[in-house]
Image: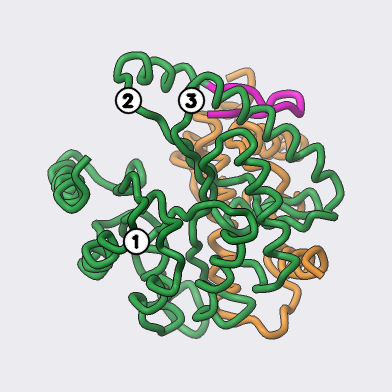
Chain colours: A orange, B green
Amino acid sequence: MLKEIQGRILAALLEGAPLEGVDADGLELTRLIVKKLRFELIVRGDSRLEAWFDRAPDEFTAAFKAYDVLVPPRSWFPREEAEKFREWCDSRNLLPPSASNGA
Amino acid sequence: MWRKRDGRLERNDFHALFLRFLAASRKPFVAHGLEFSLGTALDEEGEAARVGQWMERLRDDHAAFGFAWMSEHLGWTTARGLTATLPLPLPHHPEAVAAVAERMRLLQSVVPTALFENWATTFTLDDPSGEPEFFNAIARTADCGFLLDLHNAWTQSVNFRFDPWEYVTRLDLDRVVQIHVSGGSMSDPALLASRKSMRLDSHDGPVPEEVWTLLERVLPRCRNVRGVVVERLNGTFDAAGVAGLAAEVRRAKELFPC
């Protein structure tokens, strides 16, 4: 029972699946907080990525939004999540030279 | 105090820093965790490995710091190999009680006094006014203590409209070992299409008077409490705000001399 409920909650939070019997506003707010925390992991996890966000917030945010949709969240360590984001951006040529490993 | 490298948990830079604090201060240390995910289903794939890694780190830390007690957030953050980072609510169900109690007993096998912290959530799976009985059932099953977060309790009462004092006093207060007070803020109405705003346990503001009142009233009823902590998130106050935070710490010390 618990495993099934937790699966449905994750699907609601990460994929926007409906979750019956739960307040939609409260669920949506949690969904946004989960995204915000993931964003914070990344900028806290790598000062060059944080600098990228400071310098070009729209560009960084667009990359983050795409990453957040396409890459399931599997880490809560800032450095690890930042590294995954960096690699994902790099594989799509989204990473500016100032944020690359060679910078 | 940990980081992940090559799939393994290891000490991070804060570990050495805190060891220096320990050596210099000779004060007792307590541990407070966020991501152990007490409520993940016991039959979740990979749980044994995940929990095993965590316990290995905890044993290492306890050997180094000799924690007076430790605490972890109630809820779950991890399932199906995915993480939400934020502790999520559990159903008030015996299976959830059993899952949390099993993890609490594991923590107690390393740090004998282990506590769980009552949650603040923006949605619930059951009637939120029934949370004290759910928390009591876990504590009774695991024979563990509470970290009573009064801002969390007050936040639940604001968001779900019930009397916070009645909620707090339905808890088994003899099990309270530590109390948290903190502040938070209301969510931006622009975030939701309904324009609804909910209180968040964001630790980004001063402790509300309602929370101080709860602290004043509940302390005499908590016979086994050993510590009160004022929580404030780093980066949410500037130099001018330090005096206000110091005043909050003094106020807490006046209420709970230590």
Which residue, given by chain and number where applicable, does mark 2 sit on? B27
Q: Which of B124 and A82 is in front in this view?
A: B124
Q: Do the residues labelled 1 and 2 touch (CB within 8 Å)?
A: no
Hey, which quadrant is residue B141 in on the image? Answer: bottom right
User: Residue B157 location in percent, x, y?
Assistant: 40, 77
Pointer 3 and pointer 1 on the same chain: yes
**Disc ID at residue B184:** 1
**Mark 3 or 1 closer to N-term?**
3
- Chain letter for the residue marked with disc 2 in the picture: B
Q: Which amino acid does label 3 sit on?
A: Gly
Q: 10 Å neighbourhood of mark 1: few (<14), some, or many (≥20)?
A: many
Q: What residue type is labelled 2?
A: Lys
Q: Which chain carries label 1?
A: B
Q: In this view, does B148 lie above or below A45?
A: below
Which residue is nearer to you in this view: A48 or B79? B79
Q: Is residue B55 above or below residue B119?
A: above
The residue labelled by disc 3 is: B66
Residues in magenta, as a range: B1-12
Residue located 60% across and 51% down the image: B85
Give the side of residue B220 with respect to residue B18, left or right. Answer: left
